Image (cartoon, rainbow, N blue to C red):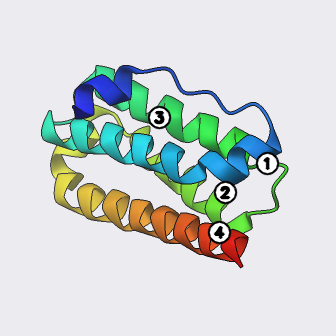
Amino acid sequence: MRMKRAREGFQLNRYQDMEFRFPEAVNLLESAVHELLDTGWDERFRRRAAEIATAIQQCTTQTGWTLTQRNLRAIGSLLSFPLEEVRSLQAALRERLLDLLDGLKDAGIDRLQAQSR
C-alpha cells in the first residue's frame, strides 16, 4: 500500500488546498521516507521523497508556516545525501528524518484542531 500511495500524483495548487490537505501531504511524504529507509536509500525512492518534500515546501511559501518550512528544508537537505555518505550516517539520518516527520505531523494536527474551533 505504501508503494502505491507514494506513486500516486499529488498536487497542491492553492493556499486553501494546503490548509486542508497538509496532513495528507505529510502522510504521503512519510510513506515515501519509510520506503526510502526500507530500501536502503534506493535512488528512486530518495528522488521521490525529495520531490514530495520540495512540493510541500513550495506550497507553504505563502502560508507563513516558518517552522514547517524549516522542517521541510531540513528534510530536503537530508534527502540530498548521496548513498556513499549515507552508509556511514544511516542510523543518525533515519532518526533525524523520523523526528522531522513527527514535527510535521504534529503541526498538521495542531492546524486541524485550530480549524475546528
Dot label at residue 69: 2
Labels 2 and 1: the sequence-earlier one: 1
Q: Residue at x 31, y 20 (%)?
A: 44
Dot label at residue 50: 3
Give yes or no for contact between labels 2 and 1 (Cβ–Cβ under 8 Å): yes
- Name the residue type under label 4: Arg
Whole-angstrom CA distance, mark 4 to mark 2, is 15 Å
Q: Is residue 113 left or right of residue 90?
A: right
Whole-angstrom CA distance, mark 2 to mark 1, is 7 Å
Q: Is residue 82 above or below residue 115?
A: above
Q: Is residue 66 above or below residue 46?
A: below
- The one nearer the camera, 50 or 21, is 21
Instruction: Read off the residue under disc 1.
Output: 61
- The one nearer the camera, 65 or 113, is 113
Whole-angstrom CA distance, mark 3 to mark 1, is 17 Å
- Name the residue type under label 3: Ala
